[in-house]
Image (spheres, rainbow, N blue to C red):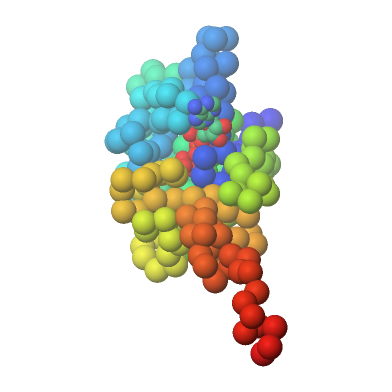
Amino acid sequence: MSELVFFSGTMDCGKSTLALQIGHNRAARGLEGVIFTRDDRAGEGRLSSRLGLVTDAVEVEEGMDLYAYLVAHLSRGGRADYVIVDEAQFLAPGQIDQLARVVDDLDLDVFAFGITTDFRTRLFPGSQRLIELADRIEALQVEALCWCGARATHNARTVDGAMVVEGAQVVVGDVRQTTAEVGYEVLCRRHHLRRMTSATARAGALSPDVLPVAPTPQDATG
Ligand SMILES: Nc1ncnc2c1ncn2[C@@H]1O[C@H](COP(=O)(O)OP(=O)(O)O)[C@@H](O)[C@H]1O
Ligand SMILES: Cc1cn([C@H]2C[C@H](O)[C@@H](COP(=O)(O)O)O2)c(=O)[nH]c1=O
């Protein structure tokens, strides 16, 4: 039975790497996949991992029918033994329905990879639909870590290191981005809710307000 599988996790937890590995292992056994992506940091029509690996992919445009694309591809004599979709959070809910149809009507496995929630902890519409329709949801084994050492569960958007909670849902960007104004940082829920990024935590630790201060004679006398 073919399956629609949603591999989800925070940013920087290895989703694209796993997508490339799944493709690589199947290619090694002579299988051919169709790889879709949308708005990868490496540019249009690319699926890239921070480990340096990159492959060509079909860029999913707004309004594109993924089921129709695959039917046309197969009718032209193209091969598709399975389908990979990276940055699946950026797909429209209707495109996720089309992927479910690819599984059910074309009998192809679809492996979708994406983050579930945005910088405001709200579900991306594409991820919500995947959660609703997927046969299986897989959490990645290599967890990203918050600056405090706890498992990172949420994605924060930062401007000059400070967490922001206003702005468009989609802004392509990266973690550990020191030069660009907008960046991202993965945090545990506790620090996401407190809006404490590594930079603000560092600044707080260095602030004279929180440094232990030796008591002065006035303290003793009141
Ligand atoms: N220099 C490095 N050495 C070893 N592993 C690295 C290095 N840089 C990145 N990684 C690994 O790559 C992961 C990010 O992979 P990637 O597929 O780009 O993530 P995602 O698609 O989930 O955002 C990191 O969690 C880390 O495990
Ligand atoms: C949290 C959040 C992220 N994004 C963007 C930033 C990146 O371009 C991708 C995630 O890529 P990754 O391979 O999982 O690291 O999503 C966004 O547009 N809006 C957000 O709220």
82 versus 130 height, above or below = above
Task: State the residue lying farthest toward the bottom.
Answer: 222
Residue 159 position in % (x across, y down): 37, 58
Q: Is residue 153 visible to us here? A: no
Residue at image coords 58%, 53%? 187
Which sits in the foreground, 218 or 76? 218
Task: State the residue lying farthest toward the front.
Answer: 217
Name the image quarter holding the C terminus: bottom right
Q: How many marks?
A: 0
Which sits in the foreground, 197 or 44? 197
Residue at image coords 63%, 69%? 214
**Left or right of 190 on screen, residue 85:** left
Q: Quadrant of residue 72?
A: top left
Residue 202 position in % (x across, y down): 52, 56
Name the image quarter holding the N terminus: top right
Q: Quadrant of residue 158?
A: bottom left
17 versus 205 height, above or below = above
Residue 172 position in % (x across, y down): 36, 48
Residue 171 position in % (x across, y down): 35, 53
Q: Quadrant of residue 193?
A: bottom right
Residue at image coords 52%, 60%? 206
Q: Is residue 79 visible to us here? A: yes
Which sits in the foreground, 38 or 172? 172
52 versus 220 height, above or below = above
5 versus 80 height, above or below = below
